[in-house]
Amino acid sequence: MSQTFTNAKIFLGTDESSFASAMTIDQGQVTWVGDQEEVTDPNAIDLGGQTVLPGLIDCHTHPKYIADALHGVACTPPKVNSIADMIAALKQAPTFGQGPDVWIEGWGFDETKLAEHRAPTVADLDQVSTTQPIFLYRSDCHSSVGNSRALELAGIDASTPDPVGGKIGHFADGRPNGFMREVAATQLLIRAKSAQSYENDVANLVKSADHYLENGIVAIGEMMGRLHPYPSLKLYQDAVKQGFSTRASIYYVYDELAGENLTPGNDDQLRVAGIKVFMDGSISGETADNFAPYPDGKHGVGLTSAAKLKQAVDYAEAHHLQVAIHAMGDAAIQRVLDVTKDRQPWLVNTPSVRLEHASLLSDDILKQIDQAKMWYGLATQPIFFFAEDESYRTYLSASQFEDAYRLKSMLQTRALTALSSDAPCTPWAEPDSPFYSIYAAVTRKAANGDLVNPAEAISVGQAILGYTKWAAQLGQFNHNGQLTVGKAADFVILTRDPFTIPAEELATIRVKETWLRGERVYRR
């Protein structure tokens, strides 16, 4: 059914300053945009001057983790500031006391923010329960902690060998201390947890759709596609059958493919878009691969060699897939450039190679990105320096800190830059609210008030393009990101106008309504 909206401030998403005051949608598409003076429809909806944006796109997130987190416990400030707070919070989990087969889950802790300045251990979590398994994600979602019951279900004891690319923590006497360092080790617990109930995983993902729509997010990039214990594509397909409405692009972890022949999909709602490669860890976990050591002398971890990365890139090109490469440290980023910068792109309308996070960018690295044969995408996260400023100040030198999240400099290269959340992989209670990221990108202020490289601030329009037009192109959502004729009628109506309110108040904006495929699917 055709519907016209008038008396609105409609951000078209074509550039950072183009607006219309009216539009018509029909059959799930935008069919006309223009000036309200041209509207003659007596049934047009008067939006009273409210601001309308194209539906927001989070092109790097972890929906499966979000689905788990929504029924778990946020172990983040301001409510959780110590391990004692964490224990108390986990005892209030909805699943607490529900039986030995029901997992208690939490997420978001950062030991630098805890009063004890250490990660929790199996002994701490056993104070919550020894009969129910407990799984607790660190803020980077690379590392985790389990209690004794979780370790038992995962088959982890003093003799369990470290998986390739991960490390199982131990007490001095050799017993596992519950800390699972990096993704490969964390997967040992996740597989034990996921084996519990596929039906529950589907149900949790279906429920998470409301969370995205409340935040105005109409499309997501699933950056941790898995084949085990079940294919992520099947999880999403079954969730869609039960009402999961958000659009999704899936990127499968390359290490799990082992001979699988993935092919890109073209479904409007759900598709396989690419593969994911991990080059290193995280800055807050002291595992990002930097050229310079950390202040305590530690070095980060290199998870993928140049030779193996070339194999992954060859695979992506052969299967006409995008390759998304997690690289936070400057040494990891340089290794990616060394392997890919002289290759011809194989995709046409989107970058063939995505650099995920691109946290530390020197002038030389930016120059290489700009001058390479390869066309790069940069999927970066302002929420990281917003929520993790203390960790970055602690673990980076002054010169390294100046290279952190150089948004303005990214936009001055030919790379396609998009903003995203990596949620729930940061210690913030609302990790994927786009407006915290937009606030951080524009003001360069962290949650603690620290000013982070203010010369790298970008405009409000640019930040919103990072969540609309540019995110759509990078995430291969070809019908989204703009409110122009022929694009999807996916849009949001905001509680406040980001283009006129003080920048200091950008984080207070919320979504009033979300429209998906021409239908209102959320109203605050």
Image: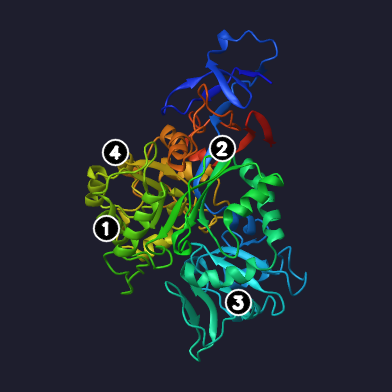
Mark 2 and mark 3: Cα distance apart in space = 38 Å
Percent across and percent down for residue 315 are 38, 55
Residue at 54% of width from left, 52% of height from top?
Answer: 431
Which colour assignment does the render follow? rainbow
Residue tagged 2: 268
**Pick the front one: 509 or 337:** 337
Residue tagged 1: 399
Query: Residue 255: in sight, yes or no?
Result: yes
Quadrant containing the C terminus is: top right
Q: Residues within 10 Å of mark 2 (few under 14, many from 20)?
A: few
Residue at 49% of width from left, 80% of height from top?
Answer: 169
Q: What number of labels is visible? A: 4
Query: Given the image, on which type of amino acid does mark 4 rest?
Result: Gln
Classify 107 as above or below 132.
above
Percent across and percent down for residue 33 are 53, 18
**Pick the front one: 450 or 516:** 516
Query: Given the image, on which type of amino acid does mark 1 rest?
Result: Ser
